[in-house]
Amino acid sequence: TTSALYSRSSGPETGTRLVCGCEDGQIYIWDYHAAVIERVLRCGATDGKVTHCSVTSSGDAMLSVNSTSRSLMVWSLDNGSDDRVLSHPHDDRVLCADISEDGALVATGGFNNRVSLWDTREAVRLTTFYAHTDIVSCLQLSSDNSTLLSGSWDMSLAVHDLKTMILQRRFRHHQASV
């Protein structure tokens, strides 16, 4: 590809696939060991940028974010189909996202300073967390789906309890954006 690379991910357990999201709206799925492209997928709008990709540890499913159309897609990596689409999950651009091990939950964060948790099977928002005062820049779901960690340009980390859907703890002693 001649377009800029925005995101990359691999299935850490299997280590067999490398996924790259690019400025041209395409997602390149590489066979890690053979160093060949298995498949190329188009993520939403033709002028969209794929700003984030996450792969489940099993390597079966992938989440992609298209910043232009502001859509999230959950893909089956076995057949390349976009099984579920969440359109406009935020009122502004989505900067980061994470997908649960089973592909059932997606967390999103971005320029509206909020973190949202989604049920991908029903395509509904479960809750929104308001723990940050600036752009949410990174997210990580725990492997057991019990907690969600979010980082922000407000120089803080937040731990969200997903069983009670409340903010569990904040860490504010960073000297720069997280």
Image: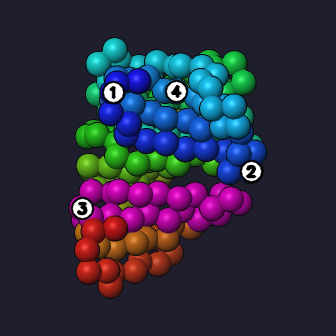
Label 3 or label 2, whichever lies nearer to me, is 2
Q: Which residue is mark 4?
A: 28
Image location (x, y in percent) of residue 159? 49, 71
Label 3 vs 1, first from the N-terminus? 1
List the single residue furthest toward the front: 34
Disc on the earlier residue, 2 or 4: 2
**What's the residue at 29%, 19% (across, down)?**
47
Image quarter (top left, top right, bottom left or bottom right) of the N terminus:
top left
Q: Position of residue 71 (x, y in %)?
A: 40, 29
Q: Relative to 1, is 177 on the left or the right?
A: left
Determine the residue positioned at 49% across, 42% down. Answer: 8
Determine the residue positioned at 69% across, 18% down.
79
Identify residue for label 1: 3
Three-letter code for the amino acid on which mark 4 is drawn: Tyr
Neighbours of disc 3 within 10 Å: few (<14), some (14-19), many (20+): some
Residue 13: give its label: 2
Residue 3, horizontal then vertical, whole percent? 33, 27
